[in-house]
Amino acid sequence: MCFDFTFLVSVPGELDPHAIFQLCDFLASSNLGEWIINREKFLFFQKPLTDWAEALHRWAVDSGKTNSIETIFSVMNELPKDLTIPIELVHKALKELEKSHKCELVTSDSRNLTTVGVKFFP
């Protein structure tokens, strides 16, 4: 889940903006989220990145996506509903998988996540 703070802090009667920032700082320190775009947005992981990474790898193996190169955009379009997550979270989970040599990210423009390629390994 990705929260846009320019919207959240402008909703009248909602949580105090300072309390929202404190909560997000706590989630970030617990490795359950991360500030993005100069602390204007917060990416909430909902569970550890390693769990998302393993779920993506399991999906790739089960759906026959190993040893072929896919774009993150095409992967996101094929994921089952229980793996419907923001593109930023998919990218971070794939970076976790890359650390364990279960995938390789291929990119010519890392600023455009939809064009980043990924090759899953069995």
Image (cartoon, grey):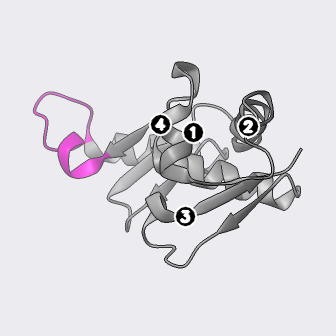
Amino acid type of disc 3? Val
Range of the magenta residues? 4-16
User: Which residue does the image show at 54% across and 33% down from the upper left?
Assistant: 78
| Crowding near the residue tagged with mark 2, few <14, some 14–19, many ≥20 C-alpha atoms within 10 Å | many
The residue under label 3 is 116
Magenta stretch prevailing secondary structure? loop
| Residue at disc 4, secondary structure | helix
Instruction: Note whether 12 is above or below 31 in the view shown.
Output: above
Instruction: Note whether 34 is above or below 115 in the view shown.
Output: above
The residue under label 4 is 77
Between the C-alphas of marks 4 and 3, the distance is 14 Å
* 3 and 2 marks in contact (CB < 8 Å): no
- Residue that lies at the very extreme toward the bottom in this rendered image: 108
Q: Is residue 55 magenta?
A: no
Q: Position of residue 80 (x, y in %)?
A: 56, 23
* 4 and 3 marks in contact (CB < 8 Å): no
Between the C-alphas of marks 1 and 4, the distance is 19 Å
| Residue at disc 2, secondary structure | helix
